[in-house]
Image (tube, rainbow, N blue to C red):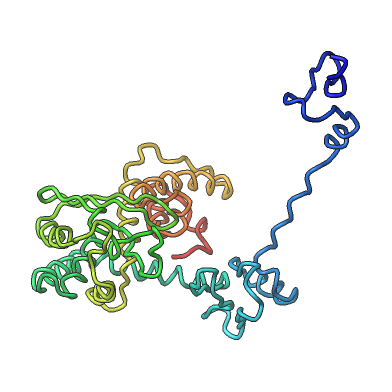
Amino acid sequence: LAKAGPYLGPRGGKWADPQHTRPWKPEKAKKRAKKKKAPAKKRAESGSQLPADVQKKLKALGVTKFPEASVPLSDIKVDMSNPHTTAVLKWKDRTGRPQNGYTSTFHERNAQEKWDRTMRFREQTPSIMRDLRRQLAEAKPGSIEHQGALIANIVAMTGLRPGSMRSLEGRYGVATMTPAHVKIKGTKVTINFTGKSGVENSRSLRHKEVADALSRYVKGGNKRNKQMFNRTALVTAREALPGGMKLKDWRTILSADEAIKALDSVVEVPKLTGDAKKDKRLLAKVLMEASRSVAKALNNTASVARKNYVPPQVFRQWAIERVGADPSLFEGESK
């Protein structure tokens, strides 16, 4: 013990080195205890590489999307000559994909055009669906026209995103899915894949012609991870629609249908007080509940559904006709 003394700490070796390889040095232990970790470096804010006066102007215009701080200033294009009709910022992200920054007025105008367009095409849904079925029946199986018509039919029936050839990094859509994402049993088709933002998308449909047409591509895929459709089939799918209509408009049309169902199922409508602020809060609660139903159908969140997929005119009409809300409560909103 006398020889081992230098290797033992106080109170019979409580702090002794278990391997007896180095002597106990309390002064070094104190220094280690006092040593603090260096604070983590603060991450540079997006858009911080832009001149201060440019940042101020862009933020005043309501721009919320800016290039990452790692993007060189020389690679960013700023153009505020037409801030309400075109992008005021253009750049490429770290994957090389083009990105744009828009003003709040641009987004509002764009949203209004989307609501007007989709609600107009919603009224034409039966005739558009008949035309899509006709195109599928008349196209030669395996041809680009057949693939495009099939993609358009599936998107219209499920509201799933069409997908994009630019975003195949583990993210899929109807046009980019593989045989592994599809299960067919009789006339029932079940589709399940990881989509935008890593969200699991799962939808089912029942239709004999669509199931038969899709089974050809599911069985024809010699690899489970190989895409079923040609890269140009997505362009053909867009061309299968009426002029001015977009494939993604089907998601908004489906959302409108789901929102109407949810609102019609409300048993106890809110009792309005006549106080504008209180009444808006009461109506907002109902809108959020309806948005949850829409979100479930679209595989996203209630807040995203409320902002981007529930047409304002659907809720406004319900609130005025069913609840007796004053139209002035919706002034300034999209019509």
Q: Residue at x 88, y 30 (%)?
A: 25
Q: Is residue 30 left or right of residue 132?
A: right
Q: Is residue 221 left or right of residue 39?
A: left
User: Residue most toward the bottom?
Assistant: 81
Q: Tally the marks.
A: 0
**In this orientation, which residue lies closer to the viewer: 122 or 223?**
223
**Splitting the image into 4 quarters, where does residue 103 fall?**
bottom right
Residue 87, x across and y down, in percent: 54, 78
Which quarter of the figure is the N terminus placed in?
top right
Q: In this view, does 305 lie above or below 119?
A: above
* Residue 150 image-quadrant placement: bottom left
Return the residue found at the far front: 3
In the displayed structure, 155 sits above or below 80; it is above
Q: Which of 39 and 117 is in front in this view?
A: 39
x, y percentage for residue 285? 48, 44
Relative depth, front residue between 13 and 305: 13
- Name the quadrant of the C terminus: bottom left
Position of residue 191 measured from the top left corner of the image (x, y, whole percent): 25, 52
Q: Which residue reaches farthest right?
A: 27
Q: Name the foreground residue: 205 vs 280.
A: 205
Task: Pinpoint residue 219: horizontal percent, then vertical percent.
Answer: 14, 58
